[in-house]
Amino acid sequence: MKQFKVVKIDKKHWMWLGISVTIVSLAIILSMCTGSPFIGDRTNTEASSENVEESKEQSTAEIEQQRMNAKRWYNQSCALCHGEQLEGRLQNPPLLNTAKKYTADQVYTIIIDGRGDMTGGFLQGDEARAVAEWLIEIDK
Ligand code: HEC
């Protein structure tokens, strides 16, 4: 009778052991599925490629905006002498072929410091930089 009791307790232990092993392995399997690095990586890649596309679109829009700004600043500050079509006016030279003569940096310096009969300072800072790059850009 005493021995039977011991055997009974042992059986109970095995049952609990079995149940906890099942629970633990289920938990491991579950965590492998949800926390799988493969799935995690794939979502990350998708997310980052979306971001890249978004920032591409954004920068195209920004470039377009920058171009329109540059054109506007040119019309306000330079077109009087150099013409709306860059054709030049009176004694002022045309700005067609600017990219063949100058880099954007050089045009920027001309805008800031002036050159010969052209006084500098018609535009400053970012606006001067934008117009300089725009003049080079449209000539390419
Ligand atoms: C008041 C008239 C006037 C205005 C306004 C003016 N320019 Fe000029 N620009 C000139 C004259 C004159 C020259 C020729 C300078 C020289 O070499 O003697 C010149 C030369 C240049 C040149 C060099 C051209 C070449 O072929 O060597 C560039 C580039 C230029 N201007 C850009 C600009 C830009 C950009 C603006 C507007 C921010 C501007 N200019 C505003 C009169 C003007």
Image (cartoon, grey):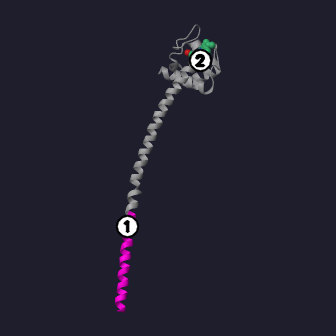
Say left or right for 9 vs 77.
left
Please provide percent x and percent y for residue 36.
40, 56
Crowd tier of the residue under label 2, counting other residues whose Cα lies within 10 Å: few below 14, some 14–19, many 20 or above: few
Judging by the rendered image, the residue that carries numbered circle 2 is: 76
Q: Work out which residue is located at the far top of the displayed protein and give it.
A: 90
| Magenta highlight range | 1-28
Q: Which three-letter amino acid code belongs to the residue tagged 1?
A: Ser
Query: Percent position (x, y) of residue 132?
Result: 56, 23
SS category of the residue bearing label 1: helix
Left or right, 1 with reference to 126: left
Q: Are marks 1 and 2 in contact (CB under 8 Å)?
A: no
Separation (CA) of disc 1 from disc 2 = 74 Å
Above or below, comparing residue 113 to residue 50 in the picture: above
Say whether residue 63 is visible.
Answer: yes
Viewer-nearest of labels 1 and 2? 1
Some atom of ligand 1 lies within 8 Å of the CB belonging to the residue at label 2: no
Quadrant housing residue 24: bottom left
Residue at the image point whose x is 46% and y is 41% from the top: 51
Q: Nearer the viewer, residue 21 or 139?
A: 21
Q: Which mark is residue 133?
A: none
Residue 27 to residue 83: above or below? below
Residue labelled with disc 1: 25
Residue 28, image x, y percentages = 39, 64
Dot 1 alpha-carbon crowd within 10 angstroms: few under 14, some 14 to 19, many 20 or more: few
